[in-house]
Amino acid sequence: MRKLLIINADDFGYSVSRNIGMVECFTKGVISGVTLMVNGVADEDAAKRAKESKVPTGMHFNITEGIPIGSNVRTLTDDKGCFLGRLGFLKALSNGEIDFMEVKHELQSQIDRFQMLMGQKPIHIDGHQHAHLLPGVCEVFASVLRENGVRSTRCPYEDLEAGHVYSWSGDPTLVGDLNAMFQDVVNQAVSAKQVLKENNIWAPDRFVGLQTMGSDMTVERLQRQIAKAFKSDGSDVITCELMVHPGYKTGDVGGCGCGPDDFSQSEHREHEMSILQSKEMKDFYYAEQIEIVAFQECYNF
């Protein structure tokens, strides 16, 4: 059985320091691609570095953080012109306040911005904070990808470990809320499968990353989760995406137009770089015969 692992780094374009770290990870062979936030303050720097180093680059659709690319986004933004944040977007969505035509226009605006920066449309698009799979949003997302010839996305149907602590949050009282939030993400991913299939959008068979972010990424946990994802089901080939967030720590300049968040300015990003580049992980891939590949290398499987 062939084991194909896509290691995708999110938030390319968030800051110059993050960009530098991600390209370093790619040149060292520990990630296989990145997804670009085109409303990130360092998106132009990111595009330049990606083209220079030939980094496979998709788009990280962002509808929850920072300033939109398009206009006509009244239901998606607050009175300061910033997106509503994940919780704010979820509240507006549950109240029936989101205009899905605005979602469609913003997604197309971001695709157009990506094409301007990279010289081509993205072959892969995923979603910041997994907002692309939310009910109502998913249907719009899939149809716009189909219309633009985008072939793949992320579908984080991860087998979550019960009792996980999420140490990166720094607040043990949030464990219950975070477990519920990530279980919701998994449930939304399962529900989205049919919508994606109907629009001919491919996603890997398996996923790892919800419980290996920041300080939660240890060699032992990462190896355990990846090994579990590649458990044989009789298939000749299993594809899996590992979602990561490496990069050097963001300083005062970063974010998506409304400033950098605390997570980007913490040690968590550099911690992920260290684990991904470790000899233990490289030895693990070799011993388990895991091939690190980009999204476009998997379309024929």
Image (spheres, helix red, strand yellow):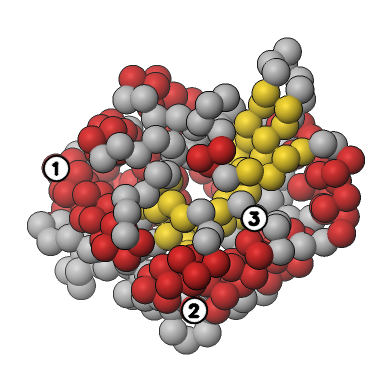
Secondary structure state at the residue bearing disc 1: helix
- Mark 2 and mark 1 lie on one chain; the one further toward the N terminus is 2
Position of residue 151 relative to residue 39, above or below, is: above
The answer to whether residue 187 shows anywhere in this view is no
Q: Amino acid at mark 3?
A: Ile
**Tag of residue 284:** none
Q: CA distance from mark 3 to mark 1?
A: 35 Å
> Which residue is at a point 81% across and 44% down the rendered structure image?
285
Q: Nearer the viewer, residue 41 or 29?
A: 29
What number is the disc on residue 16? Answer: 2
- Residue extending farthest top: 234
Q: Callout 3: helix, strand or loop?
A: loop
CA–CA distance in space, label 2 to label 3? 18 Å
Determine the residue positioned at 25% across, 49% down: 107
Identify the element where label 2 is drawn. helix
Q: On the rendered image, what quadrant is the C terminus found in?
A: top right
**98 left or right of 233 in image:** left
User: Marks 3 and 1: CB-CB under 8 Å?
Assistant: no
Residue indicated by mark 3: 31
Q: State which mark lies toward you, 3 or 1.
A: 3
Residue 211, x across and y down, in percent: 66, 47
In this rendering, the label closer to the viewer, 2 or 1: 2
The earlier-in-sequence mark between 2 and 3 is 2
Residue under numbered circle 1: 101
Circle 2 crowding by C-alpha within 10 Å: few under 14, some 14–19, many from 20 = many
Q: Residues within 10 Å of mark 3 (few under 14, many from 20)?
A: many
Query: Residue 146 vs residue 31: left or right?
Result: left
Residue type at the position of mark 2: Val
Quarter occupied by the N terminus: top right
